[in-house]
Amino acid sequence: MKIKYFVCQSIISLFFTLSAYTLWAQIPNGYYNAIEGKKDKDLKTALYQIISNNGFKVVGYSGLWDAYKDTDARPDGKVWDMYSNTSNFTFVTDQDKGSGGIIEGDKYNREHSFPQSWFEKASGDMKSDLFNVYPTDKLVNNKRGNYPYGETNGEIYKSDNGFSKLGACSFPGYSGTVFEPNDQYKGDFARSYFYIATCYEDVFPQFGGEMTAGNSYPGYKDWVIDLLLKWHRNDNVDSKEIDRNEAVQKKQHNRNPFIDYPELVEYIWGNKKGIAFNLPTSTGKTDMNTIHIATREESIIITTSVPVHVFLYNTYGTLIQSQNGQGEIHIPANRSGIYILKIQNDKYIITRKIKLWL
């Protein structure tokens, strides 16, 4: 599981949390039953009918501030800002109230990952949808404006440490100005965009911007789908997204299906188009649901009631550690960096990216 943490400039000691994370989301029984056996556009429409109904109700634009305390808090209680890695915002105290924010790290505000100017005449709910609107640094948010997401060298603007960038698009298919979030959050934003195209399928053809195709399926231009697929594949679902998905459901009573079942992206837009999607069987998933991951001192702790094989790789694919076991398994991790953790039994394989700072 990829565990994303922030290290404030004043912190030089080990920054680990002692809380445990479940590997699987707590999906309500039967929530996705209607998608069984569907494919391509029909699969997307079935998801639309699930997540846009069943009590879905946004918290309202002013309600976002309070909602963020539950949906976007870092392990240390500060605001989880996906545009800046130097901000250290305190909820309410550092909230944008109309002034300030002329330097990075001063104020946070409400960022529409899918810009409001692209949809405001077509959908009022999207203005307050927690799967679209995130707390971010005010200055970096203002620099982004309503430019589309993309990849760039950042010749126009770079946030502190080059964490986010603005400049000419270097991704094939588009040459205009784009905003590039950091690698560790690209998957988060890609899955937000897949959610938006799905939850607002009925009005999506009316949406504007440089990324949309003017239809409900596939919804985005070819270069955008290629970009979002790349980001989705390279930045896996992690504990942050899983926890946020649960918190958002409590607020607005729907879920992001592409966090619950990331493989859905492939069946709708990717390399499994034309193949019917079948929900995972409950037996293996129940077994793997007993696995928890935590960190303690300089170890990754896997707690499991079923026998598993655990492998830890670096980003070059070199095996660093491996253990077989049941109960509490300790994997040493005494160096900062990004690791790939693979946990498997005879039925399932779980692969997660972990980012550790010591």
Image (cartoon, grey):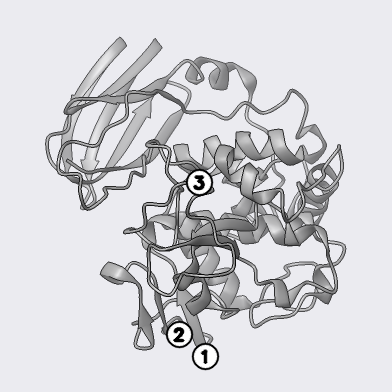
Q: For mark 3, what is the residue?
A: 91
Q: For mark 2, what is the residue?
A: 169
Describe the element under mark 1 as helix, strand or loop: loop
Quadrant in the picture for the C terminus: top left
- For the point 59% across and 69% down, the residue is 225
Describe the element under mark 3 as helix, strand or loop: loop
Give the alpha-carbon distance from disc 3 to disc 2, as whole Å: 34 Å
Residue 26 position within the rendered picture, expressed as x and y whole percent measured from the top left: 62, 26
Give the alpha-carbon distance from disc 1 to disc 3, as whole Å: 35 Å
Q: Say above or below: 200 vs 264.
A: below
* Snapshot quadrant of residue 354: top left
Whether pointer 2 and pointer 1 mark residues with C-beta atoms closer than 8 Å, the reply is yes
Q: Nearer the viewer, mark 1 or mark 3?
A: 3
Describe the element under mark 2 as helix, strand or loop: loop
Position of 321 compared to 62: left or right?
A: left
Residue 49 position within the rendered picture, expressed as x and y whole percent measured from the top left: 85, 47
Which numbered tag is attached to residue 144? none
Q: Amino acid at mark 2?
A: Cys
Position of 223 compared to 15: left or right?
A: right
Quadrant in the picture for the N terminus: top left
